Amino acid sequence: MRKQIAAANWKMNLSYQEAETLLDEILEADIRLEFHQMAIFAVPFPYLIMSRSEVEDEMNYEVAAQNCHHKKSGAYTGEVSVDMLHSIGVNYCIVGHSERREYNAETNAMLADKVNLCLEKAITPIFCCGEPLEIREAGTQNNFVAQQLKESLFHLSAVEIKNIIIAYEPIWAIGTGKTASTAQAQEIHHYLRSVIAGKYGADIANEIPILYGGSVKAGNAKELFASPDVDGGLVGGASLIADDFIEIIKALK
């Protein structure tokens, strides 16, 4: 069975003390994850070392960075490199979240560079793709997300692509309270898998987790995750509430 993943994206939220308390509350729920299940906490950079320490003795709990720079090193004040993440034991990194695409002008080519740097250091990219409202309304979302995959991931070898986690995020549903219907989520997840299969074959496509990331909540997670091509969620606001994220983890297949 493919990995089933509940990934928390805390974004730019919580003080250090609040972050520590939230992690403690979630871990104290003592959820025993199955071998194919994972919980990942994508925390702000200042909290990475603390969070790694919190989860290091927990089975299938991991920590992710929310971003990395697309250059290996250099005069990039305020940026964080993949080598830095690797040096503190971070094994996962979100790449290409829609907010960074929009607010930081990240291009598909830039994200391909980030993916390459992550894989060089055995850091698993959680690669985000998804369409804005105008693309969805025009009915061209399939072509839009396929282009994101092709320009940022399809230079990878068959071996490398298996080390990617994909997160589909309908941008019109992020932080809006709107959620793609279960049928819509399954439809585009299935399409994304078919695009990967067209390049790398069905066997490889069926190994790659595809997460849904658009207003996942405790109340809708179980239904969303039950879809055959939805392998968990990349969770924003609900991941900041311990009881809600605990229920989301429990909703994994």
Image (spheres, rainbow, N blue to C red):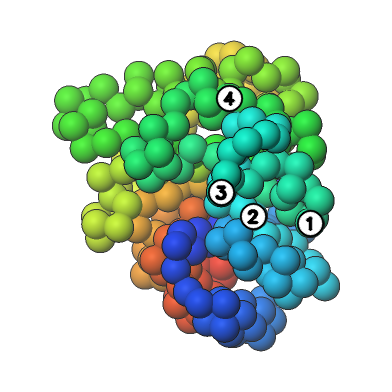
Q: How much space separates mark 1 and mark 4, taking CA atoms?
A: 23 Å
Residue at numbered disc 3: 78
Residue at numbered disc 1: 88
Question: Does residue 126 appear left or right of residue 117 in this picture?
Answer: left
Question: Does residue 217 appear left or right of residue 173 in this picture?
Answer: right
Residue at numbered disc 2: 64
Q: How much space separates mark 3 and mark 1, taking CA atoms?
A: 18 Å
Amino acid found under the numbered disc labelled 4: Ala
* N-terminal-most mark, 1 or 4: 1
* N-terminal-most mark, 4 or 3: 3
Residue at numbered disc 4: 112
> Do the residues bearing badges 4 and 2 touch, measured as CB atoms within 8 Å?
no
Q: Where is residue 128 in the image (x, y as percent from the top left)?
A: 48, 39
Question: Does residue 125 appear left or right of residue 52 in this picture?
Answer: left
* N-terminal-most mark, 3 or 2: 2
Q: Where is residue 114 in the image (x, y as percent from the top left)?
A: 61, 32
Task: State which quadrant residue 37 falls in.
Answer: bottom right
Q: Where is residue 56 in the image (x, y as percent from the top left)?
A: 80, 69
Task: Look at the image and tell me whether residue 253 can be seen.
Answer: no
Q: How much space separates mark 2 and mark 1, taking CA atoms?
A: 11 Å
Q: Which residue is drawn at 47% across and 24% down?
A: 108
Q: In front: 227, or 95?
A: 95
